[in-house]
Image: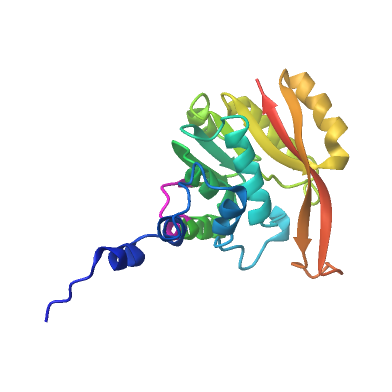
Amino acid sequence: MTCILDTPLLLFLLLPKWQLSILFSRRPTPLTMKLKEFESILQDCAVFEKPKIQYEQYPTTAHLAARMIYTADTVYDDIEDKAVGDFGSGCGILSIASFIRGAGYCVGFDIDPDAIRIARENAEAFETEIDFVWTDVGQENALFDRFKGRLDTIIMNPPFGTKNKGIDMVFLKKAVEIANKAVYSLHKTSTREHIMKKAKEWGVQCEVVAEMKFDVPMMYKFHKKKSVDIEVDFLRFSK
């Protein structure tokens, strides 16, 4: 017996969930969708199964990711049709968000092979075309020379340097060196003065785009509270 499926059912079976939400609810396209819709879509991203404290792995929430990429795209025109790099990409939410907002090319870099695996699974679930590279952003690596001059925008939620002092600035300096146009990054508000000083030394402009709260849930044995809000700056660096 031959089974014939009508078009709506075929679309339901074949399209990823984020595209279905737009199609069947008659929502706007990804480039015109509202911020709340964008955040809702990103909530389907899987997070770390067993986070590793040595890498300071704290997942970027859909709430933060949506606001970071939405702002970079709609206010500064740094996402749509741009080549976007994601340093310390983790589970891939910033890369996926950039792809949904119309990035021309996306590539994520992370030191943890387990994070790369989760990111690739997320990218596949969202049916996005994103490259993820297993490498250490914190070390000198000829690999990054290949991307110099090829990435317009770099986005990141780097380690804050709690376990590896200064790693946040290593990430930031490398991003500034490689990005053609702009770098977007999250940093503890308490480090703002230091970062502003470094940006001046590097010859780039630093703008505090927004002051935000980073929700850190109880993930590790040494955590005593169910969640803690950390004050962070959403920064934009431009050349």
Can residue 134 be seen in the rendering of this structure?
no
Q: Name the spot of residue 184 as percent of width and height, x first.
A: 66, 36
The residue sitting at the bottom extreme is 1
Q: Quadrant of residue 225?
A: bottom right
Residue furthest toward the front?
26
Residue 11, image x, y percentages: 32, 62
Q: Quadrant of residue 154?
A: top right
Q: Is residue 217 left or right of residue 35?
A: right
- Residue drawn at x 57%, y 54% is 37
In screen coordinates, is 230 left or right of 83? right
Q: Residue furthest left?
A: 1
Relative to 8, is 18 on the left or the right? Answer: right
Q: Quadrant of the C terminus?
A: top right
Q: Nearer the viewer, residue 42 or 6?
A: 6
- Would you place residue 60 above or below residue 6 in this image? above
Q: Nearer the viewer, residue 78 or 87?
A: 78
- For residue 50, above or below residue 103: below
| Residue 131 forms part of the magenta stretch | yes
From this view, report whether residue 203 is shown above or below residue 156: above
**Picture layout, residue 158 above or below residue 184:** below
